[in-house]
Each structure stands twice: as C-alpha cells, then as structure tokens.
Amino acid sequence: MWDYYDVESILEEEERVPVTFTVGAKGLGQVLDPSTDQNDLPTGSQVEVPFWMANSLVSRNMVRLSVPKIFGEKVKRELLADATCVDLRDRSRYYFELGLKVSLLTNQTDVAMLVLSSFRDRYQRILTECLTISEEESIKYLPRLTSEERELFDAGRLSTILFKVWRQSRPGKIGTKRRRFY
C-alpha cells in the first residue's frame, strides 16, 4: 500500500519504466527524452518515465506501458534456474513492488507469477540466512537484497538476537497460576 509520507514508497514510485505515447505530447520532447532535438513527442514515441508518471498517463490512455527489461526473458530464465542466486538489487531496489504494479497496469499475469515465485524462493533463503549467517558472510550477502528483503532479514535477525537474550536471562519462575481479576 502506498503511503504518502513514506520515503520508501516515494523512491519506489521513482523507478523508470518504458512507455509508448499513444498521443502526441507538446513541449515534452527534450524534457522526457534529452537525446532528441525536437520540442514535441509524436505519437509512437518511446521513452522511459518514472512509474508515478506512467501510472497517471496510462489511466488517461495517453501512453501504453511496456514491461521493463528487468522482467524480461533473460531475467526470467535466471530466476527460474535459481532465484536465490540472482542479484535483484542490481536490477532494481524495489524489484518485487515494481513488478506487481507493472503487472497490474499491463495485465501481464506472467510478471506477477514470476515475482511471486521468486519472492517465495528467496524468502525461504532469507529466513535461513538471518538465523545462521555470520557477520563476515552478511557483508557479502546483504548488498544483493532488495529493500523488502532487507527489511525481512533485519526483522529476522533482530528476533533471533532478542530470543537469545531472553533465553540467557533468568527472569525467574514462570508460574501456572492465574490471577483473578474481580
């Protein structure tokens, strides 16, 4: 769910996605495509825009959103081979969130299924790693995680630490008597 005041939500919406204009865009040529010397974008122009802009333009039927390359066949083959070994943060810090939003706008269920299966496979590895990984190994492992995965890893690591602290403390006898509140 998008939160107006959440910095992560704002950064997630800044990811650039490819669009094709279905109508001409006056005065936006050099703004959206610095490589052109034209001031206007003709119908059929292909540019990359932030997702928040693409979302707005798609709802007005001004552009057609294309699936970004980070969800293309090459990446799909890599993820299907072994999703836990792919460096998704290198492709997008918000890979899973962006994938679901793109699949909703493009009606591409295969993108949603790819994102879901990849997240499921990687989630299992994250749970294992947050319980067992050493500090030295985590230096190599953590930079490959997306922002969502990093939050899961940190939460799992914190719960492991708190559990160990709790087990080592001797809080006293835990009784079975119930207190009566009358």
Image (cartoon, helix red, strand yellow):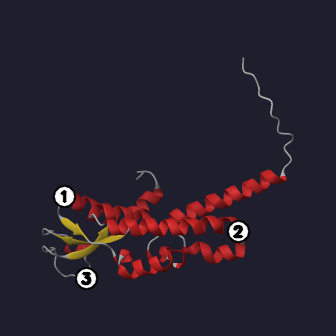
Mark 2–mark 3 distance (CA, rounded to whole Å):
49 Å
> Is residue 146 visible in this depiction of the protein?
no
Q: Quadrant of residue 150?
A: bottom right
- Left or right: residue 75 versus residue 50 is right
Contact? badges 2 and 3 (CB < 8 Å): no
Three-letter code, disc 3: Ser
Q: Which residue corresponds to the image point at 40% horizontal and 70% vertical from the top-left?
A: 114
Q: Which residue corresponds to the image point at 71% horizontal and 72% vertical from the top-left?
A: 135
Q: In this rendering, which labeled residue sits more in front, label 2 or label 3?
A: 2
Three-letter code, disc 2: Thr
| Residue situated in front as seen by the camera: 39 or 133 | 133
Mark 1–mark 2 distance (CA, rounded to whole Å):
49 Å
- Left or right: residue 136 versus residue 51 is right
- Left or right: residue 60 versus residue 108 is left
Q: Earlier in the sequence, mark 1 or mark 2?
A: 1
Q: Which residue is mark 3?
A: 35
Q: Which residue is mark 1?
A: 60
Q: Few, some or many C-alpha atoms within 10 Å of disc 2 (few <14, some 14-19, many ≥20)?
A: few
- Which part of the image, by quadrant, shows the C terminus? top right
Contact? badges 1 and 3 (CB < 8 Å): no
| Residue situated in front as seen by the camera: 117 or 62 | 117
Q: Earlier in the sequence, mark 1 or mark 3?
A: 3
Task: Using the image, determine if residue 160 lies above or below residue 171.
Answer: below
Q: In this rendering, which labeled residue sits more in front, label 1 or label 3?
A: 1
Q: Quadrant of residue 70?
A: bottom left
